[in-house]
Image (tube, helix red, strand yellow):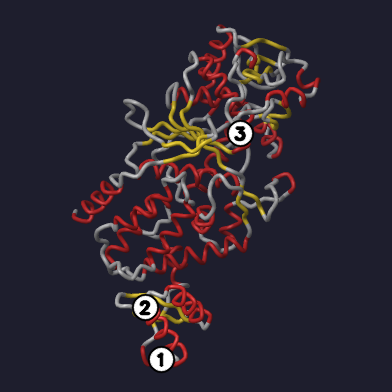
Amino acid sequence: MRRLLDLFSRKRKSAQLGLPLYFHNTLGNEKQEFTSAPHAKEVRMYNCGPTVYGRQHIGNLSMFVFTDILRRTLEYNGYAVKQAINFTDFGHLTSDADEGDDKMTKGLKREGLALSLENMRALGEKYANLFLKDIRALNIETDKTIFPRASDHVPAQIAMIKTLEEKGYAYRAKGGVYFDTARFPDYGKLGTINLAGLQEGARVKAAADKRNPTDFLLWKSSRKIGWDSPWGKGFPGWHIECSAMIRATLGTQIDIHTGGIEHIPVHHNNEIAQSESATGKKPLARFWLHRAHLQLEGAKIAKSEGHVVYLSDILERGFHPLALRYLLLGAHYRTNSNFTWEALSAAQTAYGRLLAFRLSYKDAEPGAVSRRWSMKCMERINDDLDTAGALAMLWDMVRDASLSPAVLLATLFDVDKVLGLQLEDPDSAARALAANYMQEEVGAGDIPENIQALVNERNKARQDKDWQRADELRLQIEAAGYELEDTAGNSSRIFKQ
């Protein structure tokens, strides 16, 4: 019981640091302080989810490590979060601009299944479950998250299209029902899209069925597959799916909407146009956050070309799944990052060493959180989710010889509420990984004279506060195969690497 009370107390203190919270809002293209909406009891957050026609690669998964960090950060700052991640299980054409085949139809053909709504739903459930398995392996919370399926909300999508048609924002054409972007003067405001450039670059054939090149499908006519509607048989467009699911699960206005940077020009501007037109210009979301791309060996991930890595590939090579999470935390979400096997190996080493440090104090009970170090780490997190900066602060804290094991552990666990590396209760695979990095302390009589001389000189440099010289000597000692753990009184424990 006391253990539970201590954990509850640490959680309460974490939410009382009083630090401002900033996110880069794509709507306005600037960093803004995040505060709760007036009279709101919780933060409502919608994360554009996967189109479940196949297994999600690590680039797709990186998006949800980002949204998990976002949710954890909000909770750390004292907010309750209502989160929805959708599954698109029909209606997403291969081009975001309403061209090409439906991706779910492509999935059915790939797996030799007949074209039917039942098979489409079954295919979607198969890959939705694989997605959930993958993100759980990455320690992404799912128990409190809503996962709406687009196919469960078709009546709501039809109703929303009817509303848009009644208000004069939609028109019927050969391909189906389109949204008239000319009726929405703010179209393109997200990301300040150059509409003139889009008009000039539009192909005549693609725009022949539309009033404007930027108009988009609300309802796709189809003789082969779909639902009955006032506009004939067919299915809703990809964009209207998200608007209807947001409304059904979170309400007409939300606080945060996320997605990849590729969603800004078309998908998210379309969501804004149709949602705000249907609700009488009420802003759809206060904050829009977008993650940059994850590249693979310096190039774009391309499933069609076989240039792709799945989480299963990483596990088959003997990596812990949280080594990938650690790697992703090492780059800012708004910066293009690069996956290489060498980088993953380095991330696993760093993660293993952090686990080994934590498990070296396995007999210690966590005490009070160091407010100073908790503030240092959370200042980085609260500055637009600077996870790389927070990791750097965490390693600096680990080397702080003035902290007792009880305070170190408590603060480590406190910051990990956001980082999500399972440091408090690592699984068996993580414990096995840590064993590879557990170091054996070298006794006083077993330290070579040259190493002891360097250690003595470094201790003197620390006493004189000559930190540059102390760092130079540490590097020499590590190059000789030994590591130091600084302790109080300008002395050090020595470990054989």
Residue 16 % position (x, y): 28, 45
User: Pointer 3: what residue?
Assistant: 263
Q: Mark 2 and 1 residues: CB-CB less than 8 Å, in contact?
A: no
Reading the image, the residue beneath label 1 is: 446
Q: Is mark 3 on a helix, strand or loop?
A: helix
Query: Which residue of the protein is positioned furthest toward the left in this rendering?
Result: 2
Of 92 and 490, the residue lying toward us = 490
Q: What residue type is labelled 1?
A: Asp
Estimate the x, y position of residue 88 in percent, counting from the top left: 57, 31
Q: Earlier in the sequence, mark 2 or mark 1?
A: 1
Image point 52% across, 23% down: which residue?
243
Residue drawn at the location 74% of the way across and 22% of the way down: 199
Residue at 59% over, 31% down: 191
Question: Label 3 amino acid?
Answer: His
Instruction: Check the image and report above or below for 436 versus 180.
Output: below
Could you tell me residue 450's position as x and y percent?
47, 91
Labels 2, 1: front one:
2
From the top left corner, tell me how far across and down residue 59 is, in percent: 60, 47
Label at residue 217: none
Secondary structure of the residue carrying tag 1 is helix
Q: Is residue 491 left or right of residue 475?
A: left
Alpha carbons under labels 1 and 3: distance apart: 60 Å
Circle 3 crowding by C-alpha within 10 Å: few under 14, some 14–19, many from 20: some
